[in-house]
């Protein structure tokens, strides 16, 4: 059974701080790792990492995949209050036809 | 594009009643997923369809839950009879692919409360 563990479960920081969120996984025949941001309701896509694309960056957000350590990190620099959300990590398998498996998420709160 | 559309946004019902949740996937997407989110268990897959055919329903809790996809633009998730432990946010998502790690697009969810 595929498994995704995220840490920390929650985090409170001040505006301007840099944060690192962690995701570790166990999956049969890894295909992809995805990060989502969930503010009020619907999770919205941030990044997809694969064996051919282990590092992604968009503005203040960046993510790296470590296939050797079976993990990924999501970095947010110069945090803003608008970054407050739950960040979800999910993994996909290339074996069979299986949907993404999600972790429980990291709740980030950025204080002014 | 309108995105994934779910209805209703909120549903409050009494234990024992039937509940039907609805989803319209993004046009052209060929896979549809139903997830449930709770504080305790996070996002859990209930069932997913590819080309309107159920592929993996191992996450459906029990016989009280059923899902259908009669055509490429519509799916329902039904709970009968509902119980308080079914209270959760139910998300529908769609993707362009056969399942197996592609990017999912989520609807806004249905907040279900069973009293």
Image (cartoon, coloured by chain):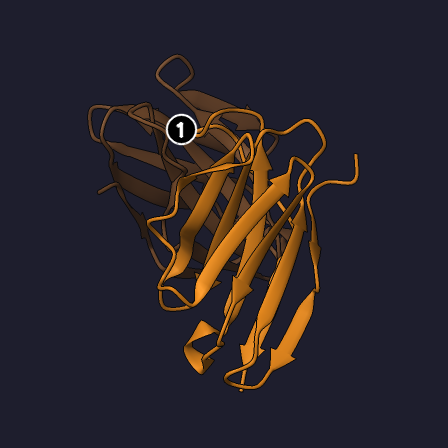
- For residue B35, side relative to residue A78 (left or right): left
> Which residue is at the front of the view, B108 or B53?
B53
The image quadrant that residue A25 belongs to is top left
State whether residue A42 is above or below residue A66: below
- In the rendered image, which residue does mark 1 sit on? B100
Q: Chain of mark 1?
A: B
Residue at the far top: name it.
A52
Q: Which chain is brown?
A: A
Residue A84 falls in which quadrant of the image?
Answer: bottom right
Indicate the position of residue A50 as horizontal and vertical percent values. 39, 20
Q: Residue at x 57, y 74 (%)?
A: B18
Residue at left 39%, top 12%? A52
- Is residue B38 something one can see in this rendering? no
Kindly state the secondary structure of the residue where label 1 is placed: loop
Q: Colour of chain B?
A: orange
Where residue A95 appears, as percent x and y from the top left, is 28, 25
């Amino acid at each position: 059974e595929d498994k995704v563990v995220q840490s920390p479960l929650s985090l409170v920081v001040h505006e301007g701080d840099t944060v690192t969120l962690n995701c570790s996984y166990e999956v049969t025949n890894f295909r992809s790792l995805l990060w989502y941001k969930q503010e009020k309701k619907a999770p919205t896509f941030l990044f997809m990492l694969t064996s051919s694309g282990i590092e992604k960056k968009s503005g203040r957000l960046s993510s790296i995949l470590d296939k050797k350590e079976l993990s990924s990190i999501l970095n947010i620099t110069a945090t803003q209050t608008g970054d407050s959300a739950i960040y979800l990590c999910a993994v996909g398998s290339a074996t069979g036809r299986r949907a993404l498996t999600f972790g429980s998420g990291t709740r980030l709160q950025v204080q002014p | 594009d309108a995105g994934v559309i779910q209805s209703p946004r909120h549903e409050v019902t009494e234990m024992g009643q039937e509940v039907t949740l609805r989803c319209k996937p993004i046009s052209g997407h060929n896979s549809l997923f139903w997830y449930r989110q709770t504080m305790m268990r996070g996002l859990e897959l209930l069932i997913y369809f590819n080309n309107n055919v159920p592929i993996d329903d191992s996450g459906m809790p029990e016989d009280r839950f059923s899902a259908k996809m009669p055509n490429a633009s519509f799916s329902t998730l039904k709970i009968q009879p509902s119980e308080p432990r079914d209270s959760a946010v139910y998300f529908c998502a769609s993707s362009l692919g056969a399942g197996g790690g592609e990017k999912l697009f989520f609807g806004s969810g249905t907040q279900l409360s069973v009293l």
